[in-house]
Image: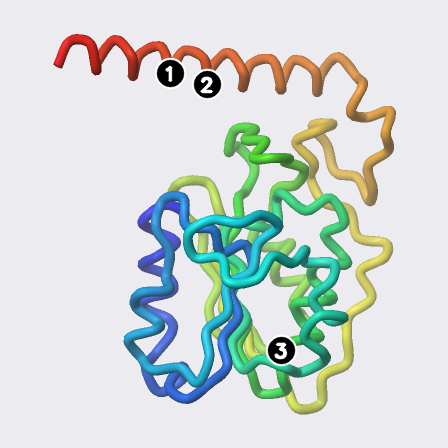
């Protein structure tokens, strides 16, 4: 998570919105910082961090596709999803579950990557979201704030209305970095194409070079 993501949450989540409320953070493993220290200082009733693997900031190991089964409908007042959605192949199921576990009148806060942000398969990377995409996807909610991240991303704060009726997203196409175009879904063939294999190879090469530079710098010190 970059500093802009943290600033967006810090500016757009107020103490009175968090205090004595149930909060869930989806994709909560703390790699480069997160909102948890700030939000816990606001004294929520409960703060649960979930991710697909154990790590700092993770209280419960749970996949986003299992949210409703694990926690139930309308079970949280605040639902955070920071830098997660681009990594979920079935993005519609993820969005559905995020909306479903949020109570009516509750808050959904999302940060995710947009077109131009490089491939980062940690462990996978599928989609890029633009402001227009998020406006459409969350048109069944009240959008309180939406803005672009200068680091090629999009930030959203939305309120789930009392008369919530979920938007049908089945026909909506998103830009996928896997195939370099907008598609409704990805097939297994897409991951075998030369374009995607080159993406993965370039990422591996970048990681190798970064590690090599780190070793050299350590030796110099």
Q: Nearer the viewer, residue 147 or 23?
A: 23
Residue pictured at 41% horizontal, 89% vertical: 20
Tell me, yes or no, if residue 109 can be seen here. no
Work out how far the residue at label 1 is from the one at label 3, CA to CA, in angstroms.
41 Å
Badge 3 marks a residue whose secondary structure is: strand
What's the mark number on residue 45? none
Q: Nearer the viewer, residue 71 or 42?
A: 71
Q: Nearer the viewer, residue 86 or 167?
A: 86
Q: Position of residue 87 (x, y in %)?
A: 63, 43
How would you rate the neighbour count of disc 1 (Cα within 10 Å): few for under 14, some for 14-19, many for 20 or more? few
Q: Which residue carries the number 2 mark?
A: 207
Relative horizontal placement of residue 16, taking residue 105 as reference (left or right):
left
Q: Which residue carries the number 3 mark?
A: 102
Q: Quadrant of residue 159?
A: bottom right
Work out how far the residue at label 3 is from the one at label 2, CA to CA, in angstroms.
37 Å
How would you rate the neighbour count of disc 2 (Cα within 10 Å): few for under 14, some for 14-19, many for 20 or more? few
Task: Answer above or below: position of 63 versus 38.
Answer: above
How would you rate the neighbour count of disc 3 (Cα within 10 Å): few for under 14, some for 14-19, many for 20 or more? many
Task: Answer above or below: position of 147 versus 23.
Answer: above
Tell me, yes or no, if residue 215 can be seen here. yes
Q: Position of residue 38 (x, y in %)?
A: 30, 68
Task: Answer above or below: position of 6 versus 194.
Answer: below
Badge 1 marks a residue whose secondary structure is: helix
What's the mark number on residue 211? 1
Residue pictured at 67% horizontal, 37% vertical: 126
Circles 2 and 1, Cβ within 8 Å, touching? The answer is yes
Badge 2 marks a residue whose secondary structure is: helix
Mark closest to the chain's N terminus, 1 or 3? 3
Relative horizontal placement of residue 4, taking residue 100 as reference (left or right):
left
Residue pictured at 56% horizontal, 35% vertical: 122
Work out how far the residue at label 2 is from the one at label 1, CA to CA, in angstroms.
6 Å
Relative horizontal placement of residue 218, taking residue 191 as reference (left or right):
left
């Amino acid at each position: 998570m970059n500093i802009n993501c943290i600033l967006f949450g810090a500016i757009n989540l107020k103490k009175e919105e968090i205090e004595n409320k149930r909060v869930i953070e989806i994709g909560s493993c703390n790699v480069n910082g997160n909102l948890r220290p700030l939000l816990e200082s606001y004294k929520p009733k409960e703060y649960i961090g979930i991710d697909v693997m154990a790590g700092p900031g993770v209280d419960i190991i749970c996949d986003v596709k299992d949210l409703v089964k694990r926690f139930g409908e309308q079970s949280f007042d605040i639902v955070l999803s920071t830098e997660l959605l681009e990594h979920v192949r079935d993005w519609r199921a993820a969005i559905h579950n995020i909306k479903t576990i949020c109570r009516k009148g509750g808050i959904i806060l999302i940060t995710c990557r947009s077109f131009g942000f490089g491939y980062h398969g940690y462990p996978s990377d599928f989609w890029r979201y633009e402001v227009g995409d998020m406006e459409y996807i969350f048109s069944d909610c009240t959008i309180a704030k939406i803005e672009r991240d200068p680091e090629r991303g999009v930030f959203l704060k939305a309120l789930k209305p009392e008369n919530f009726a979920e938007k049908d997203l089945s026909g909506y196409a998103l830009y996928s970095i896997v195939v370099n175009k907008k598609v409704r879904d990805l097939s297994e063939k897409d991951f075998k194409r030369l374009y995607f294999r080159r993406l993965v190879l370039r990422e591996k090469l970048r990681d190798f070079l970064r590690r090599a530079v780190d070793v050299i710098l350590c030796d110099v010190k």
